[in-house]
Image (cartoon, grey):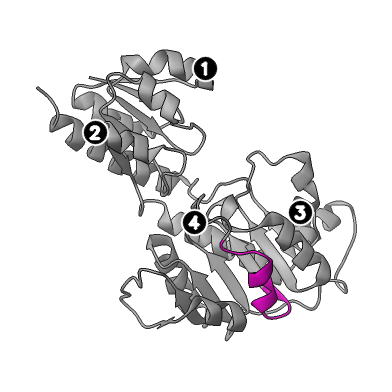
Amino acid sequence: MKILVTDGMSKEGVKILTDAGYQVDMLTLKPEELLQKIGEYDCILVRSATKVTKEVIEAGKNLKVIARGGVGVDNIDVETAKAKGIVVLNTPGASAISVAELTFAHMLALCRFLHVSTMEMRQGKWPKKEYSKGIELYKKKLGILGLGNIGKEVARRALAFGMQVLAYDPLLSPMDFFIEITTKERVLKESDFITLHLPYDKKVGPVIGKNEFEMMKPGVILINCARGGVVDEGALLEALNSGKVGGAGLDVFVNEPPTEAQQALIQHPRVSVSPHIGGSTEEAQDRIGIEIAEKINKALSGLKG
């Protein structure tokens, strides 16, 4: 059987698949090239860059498995895949620690102005006075929207910082330590920091928009290391300009790479940004590669013959 890997894979993951007897082709393909090649493969493994659309799935005459090395599957047409009996796999927990740590990196950068003081000091400035009014995480309220694998790792670290944690999740995931699970409205109204760890649902649209910003405390700091679409970027920019939002840490955007129209948000002095690297650590990539390879092998082994 043949496996197409379009967005890269760790050496450990590739070894698991080749040792199991699969042909693994690692190719970077444009959308039109993918449509031409996909018919040759039994499995395709992607990350966030490749879109496995309805057209791709229909062109994949031999496809048995579609795998995503990461948390969400929003770049895969899951409904079409399931309708054709194709197995869809992902690795929801493998990158959780890496994303949680980046969430705190953004929070700390905003609290102590690291994102702007770095640039100014490289210009020869000494902005000690300008950035002498930082804030601590200690005893602040952190609101977590989405208490899955990543949300739980964020909560663990928040407790270590001495924060009070309020969390909302429509599925009310069980916890192995005490935090307060409450309503979305209370999380929005009472939190000093709010971080999102929810999937993006096109049918629902943004989880945070103008109405939600109006509910928040003045000066709240918002972190989005989930998906770009879960926050209305226009409403966020307005809230930053009005001072309603004191700062925002963004790893994800509606368009990636961002367009010229998004530069006002990205270049805002109270915004800390990173280029969708939440799960991009060496440790997470090793875990992702090994976990998804094992899942692919199990799925394809069950279909042999």
Was residue 215 drawn as part of the magenta stretch in this picture? yes
Asked whether residue 279 appears in the rendered view, the answer is yes
**Which comes sooner in the sequence, label 1 or label 4?**
1
**Which comes sooner in the sequence, label 2 or label 1?**
1
Tags 4 and 2 in contact by the CB under 8 Å rule?
Answer: no
**Which comes sooner in the sequence, label 1 or label 3?**
1
Q: Is residue 249 left or right of residue 299?
A: right
**Which comes sooner in the sequence, label 4 or label 2?**
2
Q: Which residue has dot 2 on it? A: 85
Q: How many marks?
A: 4
Where are the magenta residues, as a range? 207-220
**Which comes sooner in the sequence, label 3 or label 4?**
4
**Amino acid at circle 4:** Val
| Vertical relation: 206 (above or below) 214 | above
Q: Nearer the viewer, residue 245 or 142?
A: 245
Real-space Cα separation, disc 3 to disc 4, in angstroms = 22 Å
Q: Is residue 144 left or right of residue 240?
A: left
**Amino acid at circle 1:** Glu
Q: Which residue has dot 1 on it? A: 32
Residue at image coords 62%, 45%:
275
| Vertical relation: 14 (above or below) 260 | above
Tags 1 and 4 in contact by the CB under 8 Å rule?
Answer: no
Query: Of discs 2 and 3, which sits in the foreground?
Result: 2
Q: Which residue has dot 3 on it? A: 265
Real-space Cα separation, disc 1 to disc 4, in angstroms = 32 Å
